Amino acid sequence: MKKLLLATAMVAFMFAEQANAQIKTPQPSPESTVMQKVGLADVSVTYSRPSMKGRAIFGDLVPFDKMWRTGANASTDIEFTEAVEFGGTKVEAGKYALYSVPGKKEWQVMLYSEADHWGTPRDFDESKVVAMATVPVYEMPMDIETFEIGFQNITNSSADVYLIWENSFVAVPISVDTQTAVQASIDKVMGGPSANDYYAAANFYFDEGIDMEKAQTWAAKAVEMRPEAFWMSRKLAEIQAENGDLKAAIKTAKMSMEAAEKAGNGQYVKFNEANIAKWKKMK
């Protein structure tokens, strides 16, 4: 009886394993992601890549003058980490669906604000088209078997996003305002540390008990740059007290308390009141 039960259990286990098994085969239109840095912006495209497989493509498998998902399977997604101009239209950072309307002589390539469709939207909403570029079609001297999206003509502030398949090639220019971004970075670095930088450094030294004199110098610099920042002046007061200068600490704490009152922060008012009372007893 035990042998029969064991055999039955083994057979059941084998059938369960077979039921859970999944056959893995290559995708007919494999997914691909291409990424490119354009200036300081990251641009990435995720799409599925169909192949010709002996078929006529544009004007047949992909009809002319009808919206195409620009690939296979789910909609093709394009994502920008910074604002860009797509075909001359400004587009904010984010993820968009990349749709197109192929034609014999030109294509319309558009960005759609919803990027979670399988193929093209069932209910297309014109108001969700954030940018549209009309670009010419260039005929290739040979057939391109597998659909491809990529980048070319890359500069510090621009690139072309190209689509190529069968014997057709189209490209949409994108541009980024690299000069403004780089200039802001240069101004920040060349201008030296900010008040927040000085405060962060002073706070770390204070917490770790490292070089209180340097911590005080940095905290004072932060307060000089941002006298209204009551949390910075409170930290300076605590460092001054730690360094034994109670008179300066009380004066700074009063400054912090006034700034906190003006900002409506009762908690920091109490913090400073407690410190002032404590330091007065220590004098």
Image (cartoon, rainbow, N blue to C red):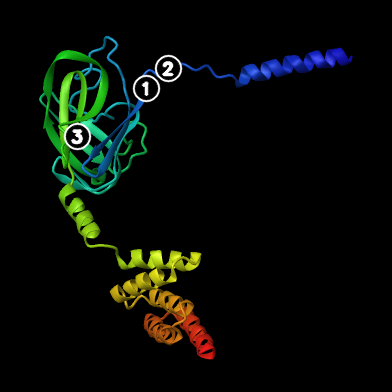
Type of residue at label 3? Answer: Val
| Among the 4 quarters of the image, the one containing residue 48 | top left
What residue lies at 44% left-to-right and 67% top-to-bottom? 211
Is 60 placed above or below 68 here?
above
Secondary structure beneath dot 2 equals loop
Question: Residue 148: which disc?
Answer: none
266 or 47, which lies in front?
Answer: 266
279 or 212, which lies in front?
Answer: 212
Q: Which percent across, then down, holds residue 245? A: 44, 83
The residue wearing badge 1 is: 30
What residue lies at 50% left-to-right and 86% top-to-bottom? 279
Type of residue at label 1? Answer: Pro
* Side of 257 where 44 appears, left or right: left
Mark 3 → mark 2, Cα distance in angstroms: 29 Å
101 or 133, which lies in front?
Answer: 133
Secondary structure beneath dot 1 equals loop
Contact flag, marks 1 and 2 (Cβ < 8 Å): yes
266 or 174, which lies in front?
Answer: 266
The residue wearing badge 2 is: 26
In the rendered image, the quadrant that contains the N terminus is top right
Mark 1 → mark 2, Cα distance in angstroms: 8 Å
Q: Can residue 117 be seen?
A: yes
The residue wearing badge 3 is: 109
Judged by depth in the image, the label closer to the viewer, 3 or 1, is 1
* Side of 154 where 202 appears, left or right: right
Judged by depth in the image, the label closer to the viewer, 3 or 2, is 2
What residue lies at 20% left-to-right and 45% top-to-bottom? 84
What residue lies at 52% left-to-right and 16% top-to-bottom? 23
